[in-house]
Amino acid sequence: MSRQRFSNRNQNTTNFQAQEHALGPVSNTIMLIILACLLGLLYLTQVTKTNAFSYKIDALQKQQTQLKSEHDDLEVASARLQALERVKNSEVAKNLVSVAPSGTVQN
Amino acid sequence: MQPYQDSVLHQLRRIRIWYAVLLLVSALFVIRLFYLQVIRHDYYQKAALSDQLKQYQIPAERGTIVAHSGNATAPLVLNETLYTLFADPQYVKDPWQTARKIQDVIGGNPQDYEKAMRKDTRYAVLAKKLTKEQRAKVDTLQLKGIGTREAVYRTYPQGQLAAQLLGFVNDEGLGKYGLEQALDKDLKGAPGMLKAITDAQGVPLASNRDNVQIAPTPGKKLVLTIDLGMQQQLEDILKQGLESAKSQSGSAFILDPNSGAIKAMANFPTYNPAEFYKVSDPSLFTNGIVSAPMEVGSTMKPLTAAAALDQGVVKKDTTYYDPSKFKIGDATVTNIEEDGGPGTRSVSDILQLSLNTGATWLLMQMGGGEINQKGRVAWHNYLTDHYQFGKKTGIEQGYEAEGYLPGPTDGFGLNIQYANMSFGQGMAITTLQLGAALAGVVNGGTYYRPHLVDAYIDGSGKEVGNRPLAVKTGVVKSDVGNTIKDMMEYVVSKNYLTYGMQRPRPEYSIGGKTGTAQVPKPGGGYYEDRFNGTFMGFVGGDKAQYVIVVRVNEPKIGGYAGSKAAAPIFGKLANMLIDNFSVTPKGQ
């Protein structure tokens, strides 16, 4: 027997409706606050992480500067050691014997 | 029930009161925050940024200067970081004890340190140019109120070598004299900038998207045309030569006539550019070769002969009768006694005997047989347009002088003035102008701009060569250049004994010409007993490979300054080049 048949007899029918579980305004607010906090936390984590890199960058830059400075110091020291005046006054140079030019060899 | 209701009502009232209080307090906070964050936003933003936002200028590294040394290069000027020791006298409790401790570490006078530390200032410099080691020692003392600051200085590994052509950098960081002045823009580069939010220690925080970082552009590195070994030998030979000639000052340079590249250039006396602040006579800073015009005397004669030959008014085998004196207006042009009096002379004789009358005769030929406006204009044209006199050469040096040439058409006594100019008097040019003009004649007729920079290297290592710049072609015809070369070779071959030179080696061509000019008085006229000597010449094989010009100021030995003082230096330089710098012999 179909439901249609009962209705024809003017019998009451039952209206079945699925029950909706909507969140209330308080829950929504709390969730939004929690979300905002999470986002804030995420932002702070990222900013802190990025800023932590600043120290690494700074340390690397200082190291680079120091290495450059050491390189420059060594370059100056090397140039001084090879200076003509120093070479001229060295023991090796003092022991050299001068010779008169002997002309040019021609092929 | 009544008491219970009363109690509930009482509690409700209390809650409402607290609620109202809370609202009020919250409202106060909101209002205060609104005031601080919205109304005073700009003010507090500024205040916060002033603490957190740091703006630094990043100094650019000044370009270094290197020279050729065989097939490699060697530094002439480098940068060195040294330290300035300073005191903040407000924090120094016992200046004398502090001064003693500093003296133990860096030396110096403790009284001076103490005096500086007693000054009414917050910053007193105690010492400059401390080394890294000295700075570390001072730091270990942990003296209150004493600190060090980094400063970059120019350093000169070769000491005084080439001082005047290098110049120096003063305390304000400006290039002064020489290359440092002329190429200051290229050498200093451009500073960078860092604008960033920083933490309390001043470390830039990477998270700020508005940070600005512009890297500095380092100054260009200069590779000079100078050869270090040649420069050292030139300086040694010049110094010895000046001592032998009992002269207080002089200069010499070696030029490649086929490119205009200066291979060596020196003046004496010189100075130590690292201690430029100790020099009391500023004339020591100048490179006289480019900045001190002078009357060059008879070294002008080969150029006069070249002009006459090039115009075709005389031929290389032309002879003429030389009367030994020419009367021009009220003045008389004469020769020196040793020239043998009147007689028939050739163009070669004019150079070999250094005849003033011969040079005057050449000028006459330019005017059709007499000194007139036509001849003066023709000679002036050669001087300015062909030999580039009266103009700066454009060499990379500070304070280059252009010299002085009288015009050919305006003024009184122009005929005698131009007669004087034909043998190098009555006009003033620098020895560099003279050498560059000779180079233009003996290389076959191209005037190259004399230059000291072979290449520029930028911060990325890109090298840009400084190509030889031909300012003028057709200075003289190439056969005229060869004729002048032959004539100058003849001069040396006939006079080398007088010049105190060793016999020219036959496989090489060595040519030259002396010049002895009276020193002009400041108010006009000349000193009778003061002379400057010059010698200009070349050395090479079939081609002239080097042009050399030597100047000796007021030598105190007997004989003519050009032949007795300047020529021996030229001779030594020519032999030095043959022995050490691969001069190609004739026929190769």
Image (cartoon, grey):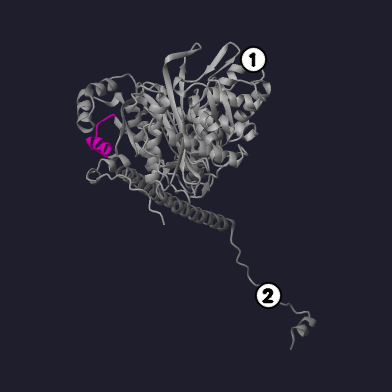
Mark 1 lies on a secondary structure that is loop
| Percent position of residue B494, x then y | 43, 34
Amino acid identity at mark 1: Gly
Mark 2 lies on a secondary structure that is loop
From the viewer's perspective, tell me whether residue B95 is left or right of residue B263.
left
| Percent position of residue B407, x then y | 63, 21
| Percent position of residue B169, x then y | 42, 31
Label 2 marks which chain's residue?
Answer: A
The boundaries of the magenta stretch are: B133-145
Tell me: residue B567, above or below residue A46: above
Foreground: B283 or B484?
B484
From the viewer's perspective, tell me whether residue B201 is left or right of residue B10.
left
Pointer 2 and pointer 1 on the same chain: no
Number of dots carrying numbers: 2
From the viewer's perspective, tell me whether residue B117 is left or right of residue B416.
left
Q: Give the CA distance from mark 2 to mark 1.
A: 127 Å
Instruction: Give the residue pinned by disc 1.
Output: B411
Q: Is residue A80 magenta?
A: no
Amino acid identity at mark 2: Phe
Q: Which mark is residue A16?
A: 2
Between label 2 and label 1, give the one nearer the viewer.
Answer: 1
From the viewer's perspective, tell me whether residue B246 is left or right of residue B26.
left
Q: Is residue B140 magenta?
A: yes
Label 1 marks which chain's residue?
Answer: B
What residue is rendered at 68% in x and 75% in y? Answer: A16
